[in-house]
């Protein structure tokens, strides 16, 4: 007597279900191997059990099979009918033209043009929008001015420090000149020259770094 036909439905008994899954999985992987060898086909098989365990088989590598599948799928999804492709771009062009028209109308309203068709509520909303835009412009302007003031203050501080450093160096040069004169002419001659108001190399500095230095 031949074997009866098995009804394909979910097996309720968990033990029988697991045994059937193990047998059928091995048979499916065996058939996939045979298909890849006999027909020189690229085969990739992925199986998840009811418990979430992964079982897979690939004739080459699962990554290459998956990448080829993705590429082929994207190619098939591209429109093959030139007429439908033209209609698609015509619809896109019409949408973009309408958006451009709306933007132009909004721009004219913001510039105070073509306001005849607006009611009081629309004009109030437009006024609020302009006030918000104006506040944003003022905030940005104030930020830029503050940045410029800080930058000028920083440069002014650097110039002040450079001026102080130049005054210090000038005083050092003056001191060296005085010492050199004392060695060359003697202390008495230098003192007498100072008493007469004559300084061979005179450098006068003040606390204010902006005072000119007389050589």
Image (tube, helix red, strand yellow):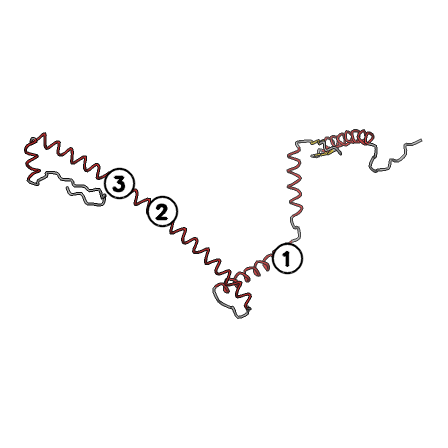
Q: Residues within 10 Å of mark 1 (few under 14, many from 20)?
A: few
Image spot of residue 143 (x, y percent): 41, 51
Residue on which the image places disc 1: 87
Rendered image: mark on residue 195: none
Instruction: Return the disc, 1 or 3, that comes first in the chain's sequence.
Output: 1
Q: Secondary structure at mark 2?
A: helix
Residue position for label 3: 162
Residue 60 found in image quarter: top right
Give the mark nearer the N terminus: 3 vs 2. 2
In the picture as drawn, the residue positioned furthest to the right comes out as 1
Q: Quadrant of the C terminus?
A: top left
Element under label 3? helix
Label of residue 150 in the image: 2
In this rendering, the answer to whether 214 lies above or below 23 is below
Q: Is residue 3 above or below residue 154?
A: above
Q: Secondary structure at mark 1?
A: helix
Mark 1 or 2, closer to the camera = 2
Task: Tell whether 113 sits left or right of 193.
Answer: right
Where residue 207 appears, as percent x and y from the top left, is 22, 42
Task: State the separation of the CA atoms marked 3 and 2.
Answer: 18 Å
**Disc 3 packing (10 Å; few <14; some 14–19; many ≥20):** few
Mark 1 to mark 3 CA distance (whole Å): 72 Å
- Side of 119 relative to 38 (left or right): left
Instruction: Tell me where residue 170 appears, x and y as whole percent.
Output: 19, 38
**Residue drawn at 65 percent across, 41 percent down:** 70
Residue depicted at 47% across the width and 64% down the height: 111
Left/right placement of residue 173 relative to residue 92 reads left
Please state the horizontal and vertical placement of residue 163, each as a whole percent of the image.
Answer: 24, 41
The N terminus is located in which quarter? top right
């Amino acid at each position: 007597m031949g074997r009866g036909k098995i009804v394909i439905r979910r097996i309720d008994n968990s033990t029988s279900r697991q045994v059937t899954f193990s047998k059928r999985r091995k048979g499916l992987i065996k058939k996939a191997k045979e298909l890849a060898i006999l027909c020189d086909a690229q085969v990739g098989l992925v199986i998840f059990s009811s418990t979430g365990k992964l079982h897979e088989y690939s004739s080459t590598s699962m990554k290459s099979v998956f990448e080829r599948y993705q590429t082929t799928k994207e190619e098939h999804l591209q429109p093959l009918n030139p007429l439908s492709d033209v209609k698609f771009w015509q619809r896109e062009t019409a949408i973009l033209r309408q958006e451009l028209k709306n933007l132009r109308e909004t721009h004219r309203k913001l510039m105070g043009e073509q306001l005849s068709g607006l009611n009081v509520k629309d004009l109030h909303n437009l006024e609020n929008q302009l006030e918000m835009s104006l506040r944003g412009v003022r905030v940005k302007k104030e930020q830029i001015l503050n940045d410029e003031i800080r930058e000028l203050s920083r440069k002014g501080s650097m110039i002040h420090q450079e001026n102080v450093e130049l005054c210090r160096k000038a005083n050092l040069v003056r001191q060296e000149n005085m010492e050199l004169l004392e060695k060359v002419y003697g202390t008495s001659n230098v003192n007498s020259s100072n008493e007469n108001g004559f300084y061979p190399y005179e450098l006068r500095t003040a606390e204010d770094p902006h005072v000119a230095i007389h050589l």
